[in-house]
Amino acid sequence: MVKKSLFAVIMALIAVVALPSCGNNSAKSEKSEDSKDKKEITSTPGDSEAMEQLQQVAELMNESCPEDMGDGVSLLEVSYDESDNLFAITFKVDDASAIQAFNENKTEAKKIFMTSFCQSAAEFNDLIISANTNVNFIIVGPAGDRIILKATPADFEKFK
């Protein structure tokens, strides 16, 4: 069986959706806090066509879920919630030590995900910026513990 990378899958799906060139959007992110002191990030929607394309990408990717990505990583779910302007990608990681490392340094883990995404899926990066959409990388460990790495369009802008 050929091992696939998530980023190759995203690139292929973006090509299927046939993205137009995406421009920058200057809408600003807003932050609010919920009752559990977890920061929730919301943003003002950007380009409506880019948002529709994100919905298509999420639906196409989710059709193949769950998908074994190799090396103890599975893609569990991909979703896009237009009302919350949030694209979420959920992985299951079988290595408890990797989960512990991610949990101990979420900033570095986020940088790793952002770097990989932006180098491997430039079209996805542009689409996120154009739609002014936030992205949650949700990592589920073998014991069911969850880590959520939140990325804003401004985070993606840094990798252009």
Image: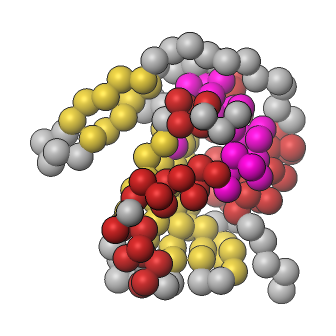
Query: In the rendered image, which quarter is residue 37 located in?
Result: top left
Q: Is residue 92 above or below residue 6?
A: below
Residue occupying the point 58% across, 56% down: 113
**Image: 26 above or below 126:** above
Find the residue positioned furthest to the top.
26
Vertical relation: 65 (above or below) 116: below
Q: Is residue 133 magenta?
A: yes
| Location of residue 148 by image quarter | bottom left
- Quadrant location of the C terminus? top right
Report which quarter residue 72 is drawn in.
Answer: bottom right
Part of the protein shown in magenta: 116-135
Q: Which residue is at the front of the view, 87 or 160?
A: 160
Location of residue 7 in the rendering, given as x and y in whole percent from the top left corner = 73, 58
Marker count (numbered) = 0
Q: Residue at x 67, y 18 (%)?
A: 24
Q: Position of residue 152 (x, y in %)?
A: 49, 35
Figure coloring: secondary structure
Residue 75 in the image, given as x and y percentages of width and height: 60, 68
Q: Main secondary structure of the magenta part?
A: helix
Q: Quadrant of the N terminus?
A: bottom right
Q: Please tell me whether residue 9 belongs to the stretch shown in magenta.
A: no
Which residue does the image show at 31% across and 28% down from the upper left?
Answer: 31
Q: Is residue 28 left or right of residue 16?
A: left
- Please indicate, yes or no, whether residue 27 appears anywhere in the rendered image: yes
Residue 61 visible in rendering: no
Tell me which residue sits at (42%, 84%) in the image.
Answer: 96
Report the side of 158 relative to 135 (left or right).
right
